[in-house]
Image: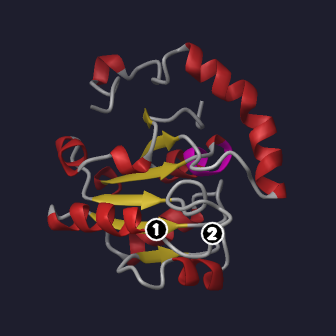
């Protein structure tokens, strides 16, 4: 199942440098809306700045990979030293592969973080990177995301029943993101 995340956490802001480095991750590829900032806000939060700065101090870079247009992503990240790929075309791996190539990132050193199974998790899996699902920052969505949420509801339930881990996760040490 390509949409099954490698790990699950409640919020991207709970992910620490120690957790990432323990898994060999030096790059966090992240969705923008409802993962890094609420979808209905145009500017980034102080929490994003502090979290990204903490990762950067430990040699971990944050790169936004978003389906939004360039203007929306640039505006949201204007005051932050975060690179981005816009019009990522998720669930296709195009945007993630562009990020890997543009920033010379080995796939095994990256993790794709997002709040949607049918875009973020699929794209990450198809691109060959580990994936980390988070809960949406706000419980409202734009019209197109509402459709995705409705479709992924049974998937979320199915995976939750299996404690969010891939069937092979425990034997490979991927069971918990602690």
Residue 56 position (above or below residue 73)? above
Residue 77 position (above or below residue 105)? below
Residue 106 visible in the displayed image: no
Measured in 3D between alpha carbons, the distance from the residue under mark 2 to the one under mark 1, in whole angstroms, is: 9 Å
Image position of 91 (left or right of 130): right
- Residue extending farthest to the top is 161
Residue 150 position (above or below residue 126)? above
What element does badge 1 sit on? Answer: loop
Image position of 47 (left or right of 159): left
Residue 64, percent from left and from top: 47, 68
Which segment did they paint magenta?
118-122
What element does badge 2 sit on? Answer: loop
Residue 134, percent from left and from top: 50, 42
Q: Which of 88 and 157 is in front in this view?
A: 157
Which residue occupies 48% across, 78% down?
77
Q: Tell me, for residue 41, which label it has, or none.
A: 2
Q: Tell me, for residue 45, which label it has, or none.
A: 1
């Amino acid at each position: 199942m390509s949409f099954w995340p490698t790990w699950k956490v409640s919020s991207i802001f709970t992910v620490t440098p120690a957790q990432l480095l323990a898994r060999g991750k030096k790059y966090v590829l992240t969705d923008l809306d409802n993962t890094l900032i609420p979808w209905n806000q145009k500017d980034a939060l102080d929490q994003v700045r502090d979290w990204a700065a903490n990762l950067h101090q430990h040699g971990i870079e944050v790169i936004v990979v978003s389906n939004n247009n360039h203007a929306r992503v640039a505006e949201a990240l204007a005051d932050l030293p975060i690179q981005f790929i816009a019009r990522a075309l998720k669930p296709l791996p195009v945007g993630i592969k562009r990020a890997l190539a543009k920033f010379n990132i080995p796939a095994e050193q990256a993790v794709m973080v997002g709040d949607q199974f049918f875009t973020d998790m699929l794209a990450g899996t198809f691109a060959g990177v580990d994936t980390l699902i988070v809960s949406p920052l706000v419980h409202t969505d734009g019209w197109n995301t509402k459709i995705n949420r409705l479709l992924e509801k049974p998937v979320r339930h199915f995976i939750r029943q299996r404690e969010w881990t891939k069937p092979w996760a425990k034997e490979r040490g991927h069971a918990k993101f602690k």
